[in-house]
């Protein structure tokens, strides 16, 4: 269901080619054989390729994640991200990024490396089904944070965050823009610094957009926008 489009496309080609070969032949035995082959391919490919996440299985598997991310995906420590309500496709992509080394973290990487595709999907749909607990913004930082989030910094080419992450930080699951709403400001500031330093490289498929933007932000701006994000609801 998630991130499996290339496989689905391949199945489509296999089935289409089989159907072409059926209609291309006049021999009825060959036609029947080809039809059976096409039907077999359909069942085989749907067993092997149509992975679907299960919330119930995800809940069971999430037991080992709860120490840091909370039972319902709301972490109690500001350095550890809340992952409740996050888009499943984004979560799967991040878990793969820890496996590939595009992200690396002394606490997190070890928990990602052994997960199968099915584990990642189950965990991702479980967390997507949870609800983020809203946070608040620092009143001292809110006006700078809001201005960067909503309007960017025109003189320096900082694109407005709202363009991709949306007015209330819900992101866009179709475009793989993560939800930011309610995220701990400490984690957000750390992850923005990690992009700026180039140590987080999971934005490779989105034009390195986050690395480009964060490299333009000063420390006080980064802190202000992180605080604003925590207060989004
Ligand atoms: C020992 C603590 C710990 C455990 C246990 C743990 N994580 Fe994490 N997780 C973290 C930390 C810390 C980060 C942020 C690391 C970084 O900055 O890249 C993180 C990041 C993540 C992210 C990326 C979040 C984002 O917004 O990009 C996901 C997804 C995630 N963890 C899922 C899981 C899952 C699923 C499990 C269980 C299989 C798990 N974690 C277990 C500490 C933990
Ligand atoms: C052009 C679209 C775009 C714009 C503009 C943009 N982002 Fe992003 N952002 C993304 C994408 C795509 C990702 C996921 C990248 C990845 O997988 O690492 C992301 C990831 C993030 C993350 C990581 C979320 C997590 O849970 O770890 C944070 C934080 C973030 N953006 C904050 C911001 C802020 C703050 C701004 C404005 C200064 C901004 N973004 C502007 C597209 C955008």
Image (cartoon, grey):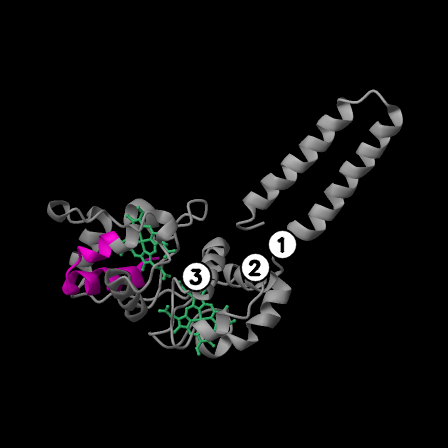
Q: Secondary structure at mark 2?
A: helix
The mark nearer the N terminus, 2 or 3, is: 3
The mark nearer the N terminus, 1 or 3, is: 1
Residue where numbered disc 2 is placed: 121
User: Which residues are the magenta region?
Assistant: 212-233
Residue 7's place in the image compared with 33, above or below, is below
Position of residue 165 measured from the top left corner of the image (x, y, whole percent): 34, 50
Residue at image location 79% in from the left, 38% down from the top: 37
What label does residue 52 carry, if any?
1
Q: Secondary structure at mark 3?
A: helix
From the viewer's perspective, is 113 left or right of 178? Answer: right
Main secondary-structure element of the magenta-colored stretch: helix
What label does residue 97 carry, if any?
3
What label does residue 141 carry, if any?
none
From the viewer's perspective, is 88 left or right of 137? Answer: right
Tag 2 and tag 1, C-beta contact below 8 Å: yes
| Label 2 packing within 10 angstroms: few (<14), some (14-19), many (20+) | many
CA distance for labels 2 and 1 = 7 Å
């Amino acid at each position: 269901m998630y991130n499996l489009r290339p496989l689905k496309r391949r199945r489509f080609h296999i089935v289409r080619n089989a159907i072409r070969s059926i209609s291309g032949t006049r021999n009825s035995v060959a036609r029947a054989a080809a039809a059976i082959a096409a039907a077999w391919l359909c069942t085989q490919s749907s067993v092997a390729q149509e992975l679907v996440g299960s919330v119930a299985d995800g809940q069971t598997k999430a037991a080992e994640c709860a120490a840091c991310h909370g039972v319902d995906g709301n972490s109690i420590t500001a350095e550890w991200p809340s992952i409740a309500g996050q888009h499943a496709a984004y979560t799967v992509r991040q878990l793969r990024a820890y496996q590939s080394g595009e992200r690396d973290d002394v606490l997190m990487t070890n928990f990602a490396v052994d997960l199968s595709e099915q584990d990642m999907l189950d965990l991702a749909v479980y967390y997507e089904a949870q609800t983020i607990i809203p946070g608040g913004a620092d009143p001292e930082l809110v006006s700078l944070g809001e201005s960067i989030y909503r309007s960017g910094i025109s003189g320096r080419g900082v694109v407005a965050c709202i363009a991709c992450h949306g007015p209330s930080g819900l992101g866009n699951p179709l475009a793989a823009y993560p939800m930011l709403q309610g995220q701990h400001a400490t984690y957000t500031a750390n992850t923005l610094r990690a992009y700026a330093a180039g140590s987080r490289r999971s934005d490779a498929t989105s034009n390195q957009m986050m690395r480009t933007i964060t490299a333009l932000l000063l420390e006080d701006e980064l802190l202000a926008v992180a605080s604003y994000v925590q207060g989004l609801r």
